[in-house]
Image (tube, rainbow, N blue to C red):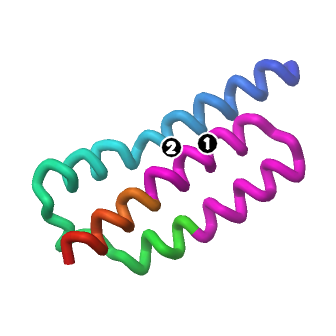
Amino acid sequence: MTDFQIELLGLGAAFLTTFGFVPQAIKMVRTKDTSSISLSMYVVLVTGVSLWLVYGILLQRPAIILANSVSMILQLWIIIIKLKHR
């Protein structure tokens, strides 16, 4: 595979894993129900994503940077909604 193809593969994976959080976030906004959401899981997850973001920045890998930036924003949004609707 070429470097370009590998980067496309990474961007595809990044898109799918990043936007997997969107349905959960939309459901939480619509229903205001956060009882089934684990706050501790999202705190651990956003910490890990933050580390992946730093890793991507250090390696200058756009797929890693983009995916983890968006994931971190979505996960922080879910955490804020969870805390707001306790």
Residue numbers of the magenta segment: 47-75
Q: Which residue is mark 2?
A: 18
Please tell me whether mark 1 sits on a helix, a strand or a loop: helix
**Which of the two discs, 2 and 1, labels the residue nearer the N terminus?**
2
Most frequent secondary structure within the magenta stretch: helix
The residue lying furthest to the front in this view is 84
- Farthest left residue? 31
Q: Is residue 41 above or below residue 51?
A: below
Name the residue tied to disc 1.
67
The residue positioned 44% from the left and 40% from the top of the image is 19
| Residues at discs 2 and 1 in contact (Cβ within 8 Å) | yes
Residue at 25% in and 70% down: 84
Position of 15 with respect to 20 (left or right) is: right
Image coords of residue 63 (percent x, y): 71, 36
Whether residue 15 sits left or right of residue 29 in the image: it is right
Residue 41, quarter of the rendered image? bottom left
- On the image, the x and y values in percent for residue 75 come to 45, 58
x%, y% of residue 27?
19, 49
Asked whether residue 32 is drawn in magenta, I would say no
- Number of numbered callouts drawn: 2
